Image: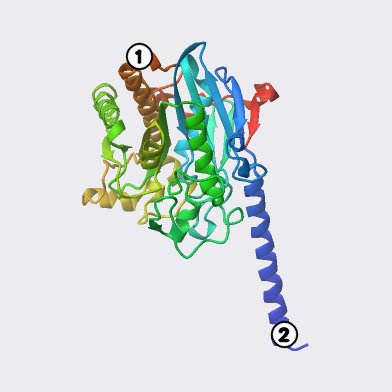
Amino acid sequence: MTSIWKIKIILLAVILAVTTMAGIQLYRHRHFQVPFLAGPGVTKVVSLSDYAKGLKGTMADTYVFFLEGKKEGGKALILGNTHSNEPAALLSSLIFLENAVMDKGTLIIIPQFNNSGSRSTRPGDGYPLYFDISTPWGKKTFRMGNRDASPVDQWPDPDVYIHYPDRMLLSFLDVRNTNRTWPGRADGPLMEQVTFGAMEIMKHENVDIAIDIHGAETMFPVTNCIVAPDKSMRIATMTSLIIKAKEGFESHVEPSPSKFRGLSHREIGDYCDTLPFLLEAPLPFLDQPTGPKTVDLLLDGKDPFLLSLSKKKKLFVPYDENGWPMANRVGQHCSVILELIRQYSRKKPDRAIKIQNVPRYADVIKNGVGFYFQDPLKKDKKNIYYN
Protein backbone atom coordinates (compact mmCIF):
# COMPACT_ATOMS: atom_id res chain seq x y z
CA MET A 1 0.00 0.00 0.00
CA THR A 2 1.40 3.37 -0.99
CA SER A 3 1.88 6.17 1.50
CA ILE A 4 -0.81 8.23 -0.29
CA TRP A 5 -3.39 5.51 0.28
CA LYS A 6 -2.39 5.23 3.93
CA ILE A 7 -2.92 8.97 4.36
CA LYS A 8 -6.33 8.73 2.66
CA ILE A 9 -7.40 5.88 4.92
CA ILE A 10 -6.25 7.75 8.02
CA LEU A 11 -8.10 10.91 6.93
CA LEU A 12 -11.24 8.88 6.20
CA ALA A 13 -11.03 7.26 9.65
CA VAL A 14 -10.66 10.67 11.29
CA ILE A 15 -13.64 12.05 9.36
CA LEU A 16 -15.79 9.06 10.31
CA ALA A 17 -14.76 9.36 13.96
CA VAL A 18 -15.55 13.09 14.11
CA THR A 19 -18.86 12.61 12.28
CA THR A 20 -19.87 9.80 14.62
CA MET A 21 -19.01 11.81 17.74
CA ALA A 22 -20.94 14.82 16.46
CA GLY A 23 -23.91 12.64 15.54
CA ILE A 24 -23.99 11.10 19.00
CA GLN A 25 -23.90 14.54 20.64
CA LEU A 26 -26.74 15.85 18.48
CA TYR A 27 -28.79 12.67 19.08
CA ARG A 28 -28.35 13.01 22.84
CA HIS A 29 -29.31 16.69 22.66
CA ARG A 30 -32.46 15.91 20.66
CA HIS A 31 -33.56 13.30 23.19
CA PHE A 32 -32.44 15.09 26.37
CA GLN A 33 -35.48 15.45 28.63
CA VAL A 34 -36.08 18.57 30.71
CA PRO A 35 -38.38 18.10 33.74
CA PHE A 36 -41.35 20.48 33.84
CA LEU A 37 -42.74 20.55 37.36
CA ALA A 38 -46.46 21.16 37.78
CA GLY A 39 -46.86 23.58 40.66
CA PRO A 40 -49.67 23.81 43.24
CA GLY A 41 -51.91 25.73 40.85
CA VAL A 42 -51.95 23.15 38.05
CA THR A 43 -55.30 21.42 37.75
CA LYS A 44 -55.08 19.72 34.34
CA VAL A 45 -52.40 18.70 31.83
CA VAL A 46 -53.14 17.85 28.19
CA SER A 47 -51.22 17.76 24.92
CA LEU A 48 -51.34 20.18 22.02
CA SER A 49 -52.29 17.19 19.85
CA ASP A 50 -55.61 17.08 21.71
CA TYR A 51 -56.44 20.20 19.69
CA ALA A 52 -54.46 19.36 16.53
CA LYS A 53 -54.62 15.61 15.88
CA GLY A 54 -51.83 15.61 13.28
CA LEU A 55 -49.27 16.39 15.98
CA LYS A 56 -49.86 13.11 17.79
CA GLY A 57 -46.66 11.05 17.95
CA THR A 58 -44.44 13.80 16.51
CA MET A 59 -41.66 15.85 18.11
CA ALA A 60 -43.87 18.90 17.57
CA ASP A 61 -46.38 17.76 20.19
CA THR A 62 -46.00 19.43 23.57
CA TYR A 63 -47.63 19.78 26.98
CA VAL A 64 -50.40 22.27 27.75
CA PHE A 65 -50.91 23.09 31.44
CA PHE A 66 -54.15 24.48 32.92
CA LEU A 67 -54.23 26.41 36.19
CA GLU A 68 -57.89 26.89 37.11
CA GLY A 69 -59.05 29.06 39.98
CA LYS A 70 -61.94 28.20 42.29
CA LYS A 71 -63.71 31.36 41.15
CA GLU A 72 -64.76 31.72 37.54
CA GLY A 73 -63.24 34.52 35.51
CA GLY A 74 -61.34 35.16 32.32
CA LYS A 75 -58.65 33.05 30.70
CA ALA A 76 -55.06 33.88 29.74
CA LEU A 77 -52.64 31.90 27.58
CA ILE A 78 -48.84 32.10 27.88
CA LEU A 79 -46.68 30.81 25.01
CA GLY A 80 -43.02 30.12 25.81
CA ASN A 81 -40.23 29.22 23.39
CA THR A 82 -41.98 30.07 20.15
CA HIS A 83 -38.35 30.63 19.19
CA SER A 84 -36.29 28.14 21.16
CA ASN A 85 -33.07 30.16 20.90
CA GLU A 86 -34.72 32.80 23.11
CA PRO A 87 -34.69 30.82 26.38
CA ALA A 88 -35.89 33.58 28.73
CA ALA A 89 -39.33 32.73 27.34
CA LEU A 90 -39.12 29.15 28.56
CA LEU A 91 -37.69 30.15 31.94
CA SER A 92 -40.39 32.78 32.48
CA SER A 93 -43.21 30.39 31.60
CA LEU A 94 -41.76 27.76 33.96
CA ILE A 95 -41.74 30.26 36.82
CA PHE A 96 -45.47 30.73 36.25
CA LEU A 97 -45.97 26.97 35.90
CA GLU A 98 -44.17 26.06 39.12
CA ASN A 99 -45.38 28.92 41.32
CA ALA A 100 -48.64 30.51 40.14
CA VAL A 101 -51.85 29.95 42.08
CA MET A 102 -55.09 31.24 40.62
CA ASP A 103 -57.46 33.22 42.81
CA LYS A 104 -59.82 33.75 39.91
CA GLY A 105 -60.00 32.66 36.28
CA THR A 106 -57.75 30.31 34.34
CA LEU A 107 -54.13 30.44 33.17
CA ILE A 108 -53.06 28.16 30.32
CA ILE A 109 -49.31 27.68 29.79
CA ILE A 110 -47.45 26.09 26.87
CA PRO A 111 -43.83 26.37 28.05
CA GLN A 112 -42.24 24.69 25.01
CA PHE A 113 -44.42 25.88 22.14
CA ASN A 114 -41.91 24.94 19.42
CA ASN A 115 -40.86 21.61 20.88
CA SER A 116 -39.16 20.56 17.64
CA GLY A 117 -37.08 23.74 17.57
CA SER A 118 -35.94 23.11 21.15
CA ARG A 119 -34.41 19.82 20.01
CA SER A 120 -32.02 21.26 17.44
CA THR A 121 -29.46 24.00 17.77
CA ARG A 122 -26.85 25.69 15.59
CA PRO A 123 -23.45 24.10 16.36
CA GLY A 124 -22.14 25.42 13.03
CA ASP A 125 -22.60 28.92 14.43
CA GLY A 126 -21.00 27.93 17.70
CA TYR A 127 -24.24 27.67 19.69
CA PRO A 128 -23.97 25.61 22.88
CA LEU A 129 -26.05 22.46 23.18
CA TYR A 130 -27.07 23.10 26.80
CA PHE A 131 -27.07 25.75 29.50
CA ASP A 132 -27.44 25.53 33.28
CA ILE A 133 -29.45 27.65 35.70
CA SER A 134 -28.20 27.69 39.31
CA THR A 135 -30.83 26.93 41.95
CA PRO A 136 -30.74 26.53 45.76
CA TRP A 137 -30.64 22.76 45.25
CA GLY A 138 -28.09 22.55 42.41
CA LYS A 139 -28.08 23.22 38.69
CA LYS A 140 -30.97 22.67 36.30
CA THR A 141 -29.91 21.86 32.74
CA PHE A 142 -31.83 23.00 29.66
CA ARG A 143 -31.43 22.31 25.96
CA MET A 144 -30.38 25.30 23.88
CA GLY A 145 -32.73 25.37 20.91
CA ASN A 146 -33.04 26.98 17.50
CA ARG A 147 -35.32 29.64 16.04
CA ASP A 148 -36.93 27.22 13.60
CA ALA A 149 -38.23 23.67 13.88
CA SER A 150 -35.77 20.89 13.18
CA PRO A 151 -35.59 19.77 9.52
CA VAL A 152 -35.59 16.24 10.95
CA ASP A 153 -39.26 16.83 11.82
CA GLN A 154 -40.36 18.99 8.89
CA TRP A 155 -38.65 18.66 5.53
CA PRO A 156 -38.14 19.56 2.71
CA ASP A 157 -38.46 23.35 2.79
CA PRO A 158 -40.18 24.96 -0.21
CA ASP A 159 -38.31 27.41 -2.43
CA VAL A 160 -40.70 30.07 -1.13
CA TYR A 161 -43.14 29.76 1.76
CA ILE A 162 -46.62 30.85 0.69
CA HIS A 163 -48.41 31.90 3.86
CA TYR A 164 -51.87 30.47 4.52
CA PRO A 165 -54.41 31.93 4.05
CA ASP A 166 -53.12 35.33 2.87
CA ARG A 167 -50.66 33.90 0.32
CA MET A 168 -47.93 36.38 1.24
CA LEU A 169 -44.54 35.17 -0.03
CA LEU A 170 -42.12 34.57 2.85
CA SER A 171 -38.64 33.10 3.21
CA PHE A 172 -38.41 29.34 2.72
CA LEU A 173 -37.22 29.05 6.35
CA ASP A 174 -40.42 30.62 7.65
CA VAL A 175 -42.31 27.40 6.97
CA ARG A 176 -40.52 26.12 10.12
CA ASN A 177 -40.91 29.35 12.09
CA THR A 178 -43.84 29.22 14.52
CA ASN A 179 -44.08 33.00 14.48
CA ARG A 180 -44.70 33.02 10.74
CA THR A 181 -47.22 30.17 10.41
CA TRP A 182 -50.21 31.65 12.27
CA PRO A 183 -53.16 31.08 12.12
CA GLY A 184 -52.18 27.64 10.83
CA ARG A 185 -54.28 24.81 9.45
CA ALA A 186 -55.06 21.25 10.49
CA ASP A 187 -53.56 19.63 7.37
CA GLY A 188 -50.71 22.08 6.69
CA PRO A 189 -46.97 21.65 7.32
CA LEU A 190 -46.13 20.57 10.86
CA MET A 191 -45.53 24.09 12.22
CA GLU A 192 -48.83 25.27 10.75
CA GLN A 193 -50.43 22.44 12.71
CA VAL A 194 -48.71 23.71 15.87
CA THR A 195 -50.14 27.22 15.50
CA PHE A 196 -53.49 25.75 14.43
CA GLY A 197 -53.55 23.80 17.71
CA ALA A 198 -52.96 26.98 19.71
CA MET A 199 -55.73 28.76 17.78
CA GLU A 200 -58.07 25.88 18.59
CA ILE A 201 -57.25 26.24 22.29
CA MET A 202 -58.08 29.94 22.15
CA LYS A 203 -61.36 29.33 20.36
CA HIS A 204 -62.56 26.28 22.31
CA GLU A 205 -61.44 27.55 25.73
CA ASN A 206 -62.65 31.14 25.14
CA VAL A 207 -59.24 32.62 25.90
CA ASP A 208 -59.36 36.37 26.55
CA ILE A 209 -55.69 37.29 26.36
CA ALA A 210 -52.67 35.55 24.77
CA ILE A 211 -49.05 36.46 25.53
CA ASP A 212 -46.24 35.23 23.27
CA ILE A 213 -42.77 35.62 24.91
CA HIS A 214 -39.65 36.41 22.87
CA GLY A 215 -36.17 37.96 22.92
CA ALA A 216 -34.58 40.17 20.28
CA GLU A 217 -31.18 41.61 19.41
CA THR A 218 -30.04 44.85 21.00
CA MET A 219 -29.36 46.15 17.46
CA PHE A 220 -32.94 45.42 16.36
CA PRO A 221 -35.42 48.29 16.84
CA VAL A 222 -38.29 46.01 17.89
CA THR A 223 -36.80 44.96 21.21
CA ASN A 224 -37.48 45.70 24.87
CA CYS A 225 -41.13 46.17 23.99
CA ILE A 226 -44.73 44.98 23.86
CA VAL A 227 -46.03 44.40 20.33
CA ALA A 228 -49.79 44.74 20.00
CA PRO A 229 -52.46 45.26 17.32
CA ASP A 230 -55.03 48.05 17.55
CA LYS A 231 -57.50 45.94 19.56
CA SER A 232 -54.86 45.33 22.27
CA MET A 233 -53.16 48.72 22.16
CA ARG A 234 -54.87 50.39 25.11
CA ILE A 235 -53.94 47.58 27.51
CA ALA A 236 -50.38 47.45 26.16
CA THR A 237 -49.95 51.20 26.55
CA MET A 238 -51.27 51.25 30.11
CA THR A 239 -49.01 48.33 30.99
CA SER A 240 -45.96 50.09 29.58
CA LEU A 241 -46.70 53.29 31.51
CA ILE A 242 -47.38 51.50 34.80
CA ILE A 243 -44.25 49.34 34.48
CA LYS A 244 -42.07 52.38 33.88
CA ALA A 245 -43.60 54.32 36.77
CA LYS A 246 -43.72 51.56 39.37
CA GLU A 247 -40.89 49.19 38.47
CA GLY A 248 -38.41 51.48 36.75
CA PHE A 249 -37.69 49.63 33.52
CA GLU A 250 -38.65 50.37 29.93
CA SER A 251 -40.92 48.21 27.82
CA HIS A 252 -42.24 50.47 25.10
CA VAL A 253 -45.13 49.67 22.76
CA GLU A 254 -44.78 48.73 19.09
CA PRO A 255 -47.80 48.48 16.75
CA SER A 256 -48.40 45.17 15.01
CA PRO A 257 -47.93 45.65 11.23
CA SER A 258 -51.23 45.01 9.46
CA LYS A 259 -49.66 43.85 6.19
CA PHE A 260 -47.00 41.45 7.49
CA ARG A 261 -48.71 38.11 7.93
CA GLY A 262 -48.07 34.99 9.99
CA LEU A 263 -47.22 36.77 13.24
CA SER A 264 -48.92 35.80 16.50
CA HIS A 265 -49.71 39.40 17.43
CA ARG A 266 -51.39 39.87 14.05
CA GLU A 267 -53.17 36.61 13.21
CA ILE A 268 -54.50 35.77 16.68
CA GLY A 269 -56.33 39.08 16.83
CA ASP A 270 -57.56 38.82 13.26
CA TYR A 271 -58.84 35.23 13.42
CA CYS A 272 -60.35 34.98 16.90
CA ASP A 273 -61.62 37.16 19.74
CA THR A 274 -58.48 36.77 21.88
CA LEU A 275 -56.39 39.87 22.57
CA PRO A 276 -52.77 39.11 21.55
CA PHE A 277 -49.50 40.56 22.86
CA LEU A 278 -45.91 39.71 22.01
CA LEU A 279 -43.12 40.51 24.48
CA GLU A 280 -39.53 41.21 23.46
CA ALA A 281 -36.65 41.44 25.96
CA PRO A 282 -33.09 42.31 24.85
CA LEU A 283 -31.01 39.23 24.01
CA PRO A 284 -27.36 40.14 23.22
CA PHE A 285 -26.58 36.50 22.38
CA LEU A 286 -28.50 36.92 19.10
CA ASP A 287 -26.62 40.00 17.92
CA GLN A 288 -24.23 39.39 15.03
CA PRO A 289 -21.22 41.54 16.06
CA THR A 290 -20.42 39.67 19.27
CA GLY A 291 -17.66 37.42 20.51
CA PRO A 292 -18.09 33.63 20.74
CA LYS A 293 -21.63 32.36 21.35
CA THR A 294 -20.88 31.00 24.81
CA VAL A 295 -23.15 30.02 27.67
CA ASP A 296 -21.77 32.99 29.60
CA LEU A 297 -22.91 35.38 26.85
CA LEU A 298 -26.32 33.70 26.83
CA LEU A 299 -26.73 34.10 30.59
CA ASP A 300 -25.06 37.41 31.44
CA GLY A 301 -25.37 39.25 28.11
CA LYS A 302 -21.93 40.83 28.47
CA ASP A 303 -19.97 41.47 25.29
CA PRO A 304 -17.12 43.94 24.61
CA PHE A 305 -18.14 44.51 21.00
CA LEU A 306 -21.70 45.45 21.96
CA LEU A 307 -20.33 47.71 24.68
CA SER A 308 -18.26 49.51 22.04
CA LEU A 309 -21.31 49.83 19.77
CA SER A 310 -23.36 51.15 22.67
CA LYS A 311 -20.87 53.96 23.22
CA LYS A 312 -21.33 54.83 19.53
CA LYS A 313 -25.12 54.83 20.02
CA LYS A 314 -25.68 51.92 17.64
CA LEU A 315 -27.95 49.92 19.97
CA PHE A 316 -31.66 50.30 20.63
CA VAL A 317 -31.43 49.62 24.38
CA PRO A 318 -29.28 50.93 27.22
CA TYR A 319 -26.12 48.83 27.49
CA ASP A 320 -23.18 49.05 29.88
CA GLU A 321 -20.61 46.82 31.61
CA ASN A 322 -23.46 44.95 33.35
CA GLY A 323 -24.74 43.54 30.05
CA TRP A 324 -28.31 42.21 29.99
CA PRO A 325 -28.41 39.31 32.50
CA MET A 326 -30.95 36.52 32.24
CA ALA A 327 -32.55 37.57 35.54
CA ASN A 328 -33.34 41.00 34.09
CA ARG A 329 -34.96 39.47 31.01
CA VAL A 330 -36.99 36.89 32.93
CA GLY A 331 -37.98 39.39 35.61
CA GLN A 332 -39.09 41.82 32.93
CA HIS A 333 -41.28 39.18 31.30
CA CYS A 334 -42.85 38.19 34.62
CA SER A 335 -43.77 41.77 35.51
CA VAL A 336 -45.09 42.64 32.04
CA ILE A 337 -47.24 39.49 31.92
CA LEU A 338 -48.70 40.15 35.36
CA GLU A 339 -49.39 43.78 34.49
CA LEU A 340 -51.02 42.94 31.15
CA ILE A 341 -53.35 40.55 32.93
CA ARG A 342 -54.06 43.11 35.66
CA GLN A 343 -54.87 45.81 33.13
CA TYR A 344 -57.16 43.45 31.23
CA SER A 345 -58.93 42.56 34.48
CA ARG A 346 -59.47 46.24 35.29
CA LYS A 347 -61.00 46.78 31.87
CA LYS A 348 -63.14 43.62 32.02
CA PRO A 349 -63.98 43.04 35.71
CA ASP A 350 -66.57 40.41 34.80
CA ARG A 351 -63.70 38.41 33.17
CA ALA A 352 -61.04 39.21 35.77
CA ILE A 353 -57.97 36.97 36.09
CA LYS A 354 -56.16 37.04 39.44
CA ILE A 355 -52.78 35.35 39.95
CA GLN A 356 -50.82 34.92 43.18
CA ASN A 357 -47.28 33.78 44.06
CA VAL A 358 -45.45 34.89 40.90
CA PRO A 359 -42.35 37.08 41.39
CA ARG A 360 -41.93 40.43 39.70
CA TYR A 361 -38.90 42.15 38.18
CA ALA A 362 -37.16 43.23 41.39
CA ASP A 363 -37.72 39.83 43.04
CA VAL A 364 -36.15 37.88 40.18
CA ILE A 365 -33.14 40.21 40.02
CA LYS A 366 -32.64 39.94 43.79
CA ASN A 367 -33.07 36.16 44.09
CA GLY A 368 -32.06 34.88 40.66
CA VAL A 369 -34.11 32.86 38.18
CA GLY A 370 -33.27 29.47 39.69
CA PHE A 371 -34.61 30.47 43.11
CA TYR A 372 -38.12 29.89 41.76
CA PHE A 373 -37.50 26.38 40.40
CA GLN A 374 -38.43 23.37 42.52
CA ASP A 375 -36.20 20.36 43.09
CA PRO A 376 -37.56 17.45 40.98
CA LEU A 377 -36.06 14.96 43.46
CA LYS A 378 -38.42 16.30 46.12
CA LYS A 379 -41.45 16.39 43.85
CA ASP A 380 -44.08 13.69 43.44
CA LYS A 381 -43.29 11.94 40.14
CA LYS A 382 -46.89 12.30 38.99
CA ASN A 383 -46.34 16.06 38.89
CA ILE A 384 -43.21 15.89 36.70
CA TYR A 385 -43.57 16.08 32.93
CA TYR A 386 -40.50 15.50 30.78
CA ASN A 387 -40.27 17.53 27.60
Amino acid found under the numbered disc labelled 1:
Pro
Residue extending farthest bottom:
2
Q: Is residue 56 left or right of residue 346?
A: right
Q: Which residue is mark 2?
A: 5
Vertical arrangement, residue 316 with respect to residue 96, above or below: below
Name the foreground residue: 354 vs 95: 354
Query: Mark 1 or mark 2, which has the lower sequence index?
Result: 2
Vertical arrangement, residue 119 with respect to residue 288, above or below: above
Q: Is residue 255 left or right of residue 288?
A: left
Q: Which residue is mark 1?
A: 349
**Residue visible at 44% across and 62% down in the picture:** 160
Q: Residue 242 location in percent, x, y?
A: 26, 23
**Residue visible at 65% across and 27% down in the picture:** 384
Q: CA distance from mark 1 to mark 2?
A: 80 Å
**Residue visible at 66% across and 70% down in the picture:** 15
Mark 1 vs mark 2: in front: 1
Residue 145 showing in the rendered view? no
Name the foreground residue: 130 vs 178: 178
Looking at the rendered structure, the secondary structure element under dot 2 is helix
Residue extending farthest top:
71
Vertical arrangement, residue 10 with respect to residue 283, above or below: below
Q: Residue 78 location in percent, x, y?
A: 46, 31
**Residue visible at 78% across and 87% down in the picture:** 1
Looking at the rendered structure, the secondary structure element under dot 1 is helix
Amino acid found under the numbered disc labelled 2:
Trp
Residue 287 showing in the rendered view? yes
